[in-house]
Image: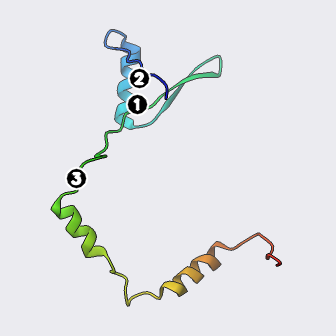
Amino acid sequence: MAREIQVDVTGTPDLLRLAEEVSATRTPRILSRDHEPLAVVVPIIKTRRGSTPSDADLAATLASAGAWKGLVDAEALKREIKEARGSSRPPAEL
């Protein structure tokens, strides 16, 4: 893993504006010189990784289990999806 080096851009208005824009829009920007890419500025997205789900989260998940039972024929649905996707591959000969 690459070693992360933090660079404070507080005193560099152009870099600060770019960093704020990337953070606000959550859209990466490629920095280039003479049309040659040099670096990428990406937003830091905070996640809840490692957090414990709340009781409401667990209840909602459990409540959705089996929600399609009796409403949809699963095998027919899978066949319809497969047919809709089509295939350009020739049939396999064994």
What residue is rendered at 68% in x and 74% in y?
86
Q: Which mark is residue 18?
A: 2
Location of mark 1 (residue): 22
What residue is rendered at 34% in x and 80% in y?
66
Q: Nearer the viewer, residue 6 or 22?
A: 6
Dots 2, 1 in contact, CB < 8 A: yes
Work out how far the residue at label 3 is from the one at label 1, CA to CA, in angstroms: 29 Å
Side (left or right) of 3 relative to 93: left
Residue 40 position in % (x across, y down)? 51, 27
Location of mark 3 (residue): 52
Work out how far the residue at label 2 is from the one at label 3, CA to CA, in angstroms: 34 Å
Work out how far the residue at label 2 is from the one at label 1, CA to CA, in angstroms: 6 Å
- Mark 3 or 1 closer to N-term? 1
SS for callout 2:
helix
Q: Amino acid at mark 3?
A: Thr
What residue is rendered at 34% in x and 14% in y?
8
